[in-house]
Amino acid sequence: MSMITNETKGTIWHGPVRVADTFSKRFRGLMLARGINHALVFILPAETRINASIHTFFMLSDIDVIWLDSSRRVVDLKTAKKWRLYAPKKAAKYIIEGPVGLIKALEVEEGDLMSWSPTEEKGKTIPVKSLIPGKIDLKGSGSGVAMMEGVQEVKDKGAENVYADSF
């Protein structure tokens, strides 16, 4: 379950939490996002004031912003208006951006200890069709993998024997 927790106050915000831990994710941020209903936790490469500066150019709505130091203590917070620049009062290693109301829901104040549990991201799968009809035998490839001719053959052999016969 994803959430952001103000450990000092014991308050919890239940909602989707995403992590921006790469340059491209941090660059994109919440720009052009409509109806922000999730929080985005930025993990910065270093704890500095300059690198923790943000802009709200190309934002479609205002957002709540919480800056944290490397120990996850709040060093600054504010509701950021569209089309502005913001820098935290002190150096920050993490930034939490979310919908307006996030700060109030968590009762955040400077010095509070914060934590988060991100929403699990599911990997993308790509369906692949076999181009070779009929039996495929990879025993000679040295990979230790063999495929059966069809599902019926698997059923006839029994699942426990298929694995043993494949090697």
Image (cartoon, grey):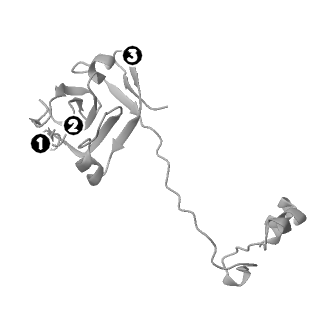
- The percent coordinates of residue 45 (x first, y second) are 24, 48
**Residue at the image point whose x is 13% and y is 38% from the top:** 49
| Nearest the eye: 144 or 71 | 144
Q: Does label 3 or label 2 sit earlier along the sequence?
A: 3
- The percent coordinates of residue 114 (x first, y second) are 33, 26
**Residue at the image point whose x is 70% and y is 75% from the top:** 144
Instruction: Find disc 1 in the rendering and name its residue.
Output: 50
Q: Residues within 10 Å of mark 1 (few under 14, many from 20)?
A: few
Q: CA distance from mark 3 to mark 2?
A: 31 Å
Instruction: Find disc 3 in the rendering and name its residue.
Output: 10
| Nearest the eye: 48 or 14 | 14
Q: CA distance from mark 2 to mark 1?
A: 24 Å
Which amino acid type is shown beneath numbered disc 3?
Answer: Gly
Please say if the residues under marks 1 and 3 sit with CB atoms less than 8 Å apart: no
Which one is in front in this view, the residue at disc 2 or the one at disc 1? 2
Which amino acid type is shown beneath numbered disc 2?
Answer: Leu
**Residue at the image point whose x is 32% and y is 37% from the top:** 40
Picture quarter with the C terminus: bottom right
Please say if the residues under marks 3 and 2 sit with CB atoms less than 8 Å apart: no
Q: Quadrant of residue 84?
A: top left
Q: Quadrant of residue 85?
A: top left
Which one is in front in this view, the residue at disc 3 or the one at disc 2? 2
Q: Does label 1 or label 3 sit earlier along the sequence?
A: 3
Q: Is residue 59 left or right of residue 126?
A: left
Secondary element type, mark 2: loop
Instruction: Find disc 2 in the rendering and name its residue.
Output: 60
Q: Residues within 10 Å of mark 3 (few under 14, many from 20)?
A: few
Considering only vertical position in the picture, is 70 above or below 20?
A: above
Q: Please state the total of marks drawn on the protein image.
A: 3
